Amino acid sequence: MGVHVQWAWAHMCLGIPGQVLERLDDGLAKVDFSGVRREVSVVFTPEAEPGDWVLVHVGFALAQIDEDEARATLQLLGEAIAAELAT
Amino acid sequence: MKYVDEYRSADAALAIAAELRTLVEPGDHLKLMEVCGGHTHAIYRHGLDVLLPDEVELVHGPGCPVCVIPLGRVDDAISLAERPEVTFTSFGDMLRVPGGRNRSLLEAKARGADVRIVYSPLDALKIAVAEPDREVVFFGVGFETTAPATALTLVRARERGIHNFSVFCNHVLIGPALRAILDSPDVQLDGFVGPGHVSTVIGTRPYEFVCSEYGLPLVVAGFEPTDILQAVAMLLRQLHDGRAEVENAYGRVVRRLGNPRALAALETAFAVREDFEWRGLGAIPRSGLRIADAFADLDAEQRFTVPGARIEDPKACRCGDVLRGRAKPYECGVFGTACTPERPLGTCMVSSEGACAAYYAYGRHRT
């Protein structure tokens, strides 16, 4: 288990990103956290389908991770690096 | 790990740090408060404080929900746990927190109380189903981040007609806490790093009063090093430009209106208390949640009697000043001596997300 996953798992206030593997009954889904698989409630993110990434807190997915936004942030970071290298 | 590693790029962090230095003037002293235990921990874990220009000081507000539970409520939890018919379930973080007589749930467990660690309130409900002869009580703790999980569990218990389950509710609200900090005398802040995960639930709109009423900028941030540095850069840009706005640097999970389903669950299962006592800060109006009347039969405070004593924080402890950004942990007389993570005296030392515990763990014993 990754150190980050282990750390977040032990602390209630931290959330961890995981990838939905499979929807189950009862508002649950099987979610993969860097190889660790757990059942998570997706009642608050019902549109999360297998392949989607969700942010999980105390056994509940609270948000679906927006891939476009994630890419946009990473692109900004890339630009920051490029700007720094250019100076 | 996807959505983690990319935001830990050292090159990106150093690039932002370089930009930060261009956004301050010599002689500035900018105090930025974060109000999330996850941020406090990430800042010291990744050494972000040393990347900041000297002109920028990060202070740590009441963002750790474990730390803000008052001593009397911990004693109430212990008294519930010590009832022979009760199986008391809690997040692991709460177990070491000392109550008024310096006793913790962990010690109650060692003396024979049936105290069990759960990762999710749904796990507590599972125990209630599996062991119908036990009275299973869940210790509901946390901001709007964890409260929807408790709310949904109450709804599930009701739907399934599970009667041997109840919640000892200590959920708190971030907005009133921010207001209480801003209204404290002698508090001088220049902006807030807004909590990331609370905001996945409540969105960014509830912070708008910080800008409109107090004239301060607030930037919601994620938890990776570049997330936090980026938020600091956005705050410095706002201060530089003379703006005070709510900005969102955690757009990959936070939306302006939050998560409507989670908010609806809160609305269903909880009501706002007239006031709630916070460790280190005292009573704050409308800052805590209780179980809604419709779920009163699942409220542990109504099902059982709890002592409900109000216990003063230890006199030697300066947590109240630390939580308002008026003192650094190492300025407290008992930091690292009478108060350590093994034997915490004050609220900020009890959970690893508390400011004092983070300073202690990562060697920030002085400037």
Image (cartoon, rainbow, N blue to C red):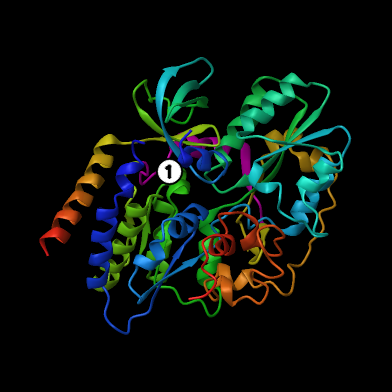
Chain letter belonging to callout 1? B
Q: Position of residue B12 (x, y in %)?
A: 25, 54
Residue receiving disc 1: B200
Is B126 drawn above or below residue B337 in the view shown?
above
Q: Is residue B218 magenta?
A: no
Q: Residue at x 51, y 21 (%)?
A: A28
Nearer the observer, B316 or B192: B316
Is B184 drawn above or below residue B285 in the view shown?
below
Q: Residue at x 84, y 46 (%)?
A: B79
Q: Residue at x 37, y 79 (%)?
A: B29
Residue B150 found in image quarter: top right
Residue B202 visible in image: yes
Magenta region: which residues? Answer: B253-274
Q: Position of residue B11 (x, y in %)?
A: 25, 54
Q: Position of residue B351 (x, y in %)?
A: 62, 54
Q: Residue at x 80, y 52 (%)?
A: B75
